[in-house]
Image: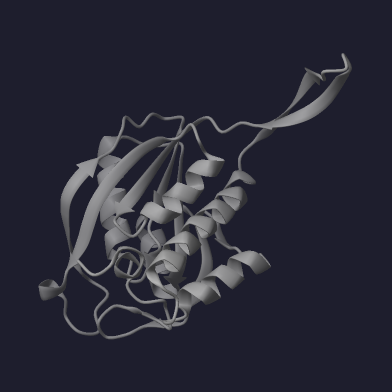
Amino acid sequence: MTITVIDHPLAQSIITMLRDKRTGQIEFRKGLVRLGRLMGYEVAKSFPTREVEVETPLGVKTRGVTVDMGDVVIIQILRAAMPMVEGLLKVFPMARMGVISAKRREDTHERGSMEFEIEMNYVRIPRIQRDTTVMVVDPMLATGSTMIAALNTVKEKGEPRRMILINAIGTKQAIERVLRKYPQADIYLAAIDPEINENGYIIPGLGDAGDRAYGEA
């Protein structure tokens, strides 16, 4: 289990832009794409590498390095994760794709609680093997309810070699809650915000990522 907060200045600049209420829909969506790509580079640093020998066009042999990506499945939580996944695919172009359409049932929530019932309308997850690395992507890790529900669904499909959670912003409470259930997970974030409000939204956060990227449903 690792928790990695990406402090690269460009990532932090993008997060600042995403937080700004003046940021328009297209700029917001493109920002998530850029952030996904940056976070993908950070995740790739944790993959094993091996030395290889190649021959250049001048007929000279030289040593180099290749990253062993292996079998990667990227699962996006619709709809907010779509731009981040677009960026991630620039780093993991051979990844197989899974989709989970999940949303909170607000009518089941007690004010001040971190517990939400999660409604899943659509689930398509490819075959997961013991050597598979699964990445679950959702911009906001607020209470952990959606992520835990998604990971429960993944577990029903198989036991991956590694589980990686990729979030733009999370809270300490949600991270702790997810890791109690899935202590083997590695979590990558660009920011950890200090609190969630009584309605279960991250403060200061950046608003509803799905609505800001694609418009209100």
Question: Position of 151 compared to 189: left or right?
Answer: left
Name which residue lies at 28% across and 52% down: 150
* Residue 170 image offset from top left, x and y in percent: 44, 69
* Residue 127 image offset from top left, x and y in percent: 32, 29
Residue 174 in sight: yes
Name which residue lies at 37% across and 56% down: 81
Count of labels in the image: 0
Question: Position of 93 compared to 174: left or right?
Answer: right
Indicate how the structure is coloured in the image.
Answer: one colour
Question: Position of 44 compared to 149: left or right?
Answer: right
**What quarter of the picture does the C terminus occupy?**
bottom left
Residue 133 position (above or below residue 144): above
Residue 7 in sight: no
* Residue 31 image offset from top left, x and y in percent: 49, 63
Question: Position of 72 compared to 124: left or right?
Answer: right
Name which residue lies at 66% across and 64% down: 8
Residue 124 location, quadrant: top left
Looking at the image, the residue that sits furthest to the top is: 59
Residue 18 position (above or below residue 188): below
Looking at the image, the residue that sits furthest to the left is: 107
Name which residue lies at 38% across and 66% down: 141
Residue 199 position (above or below residue 87): below
Nearer the observer, 2 or 124: 124
* Residue 68 image offset from top left, x and y in percent: 61, 31
Residue 50 position (above or below residue 151): above
Nearer the observer, 119 or 90: 90
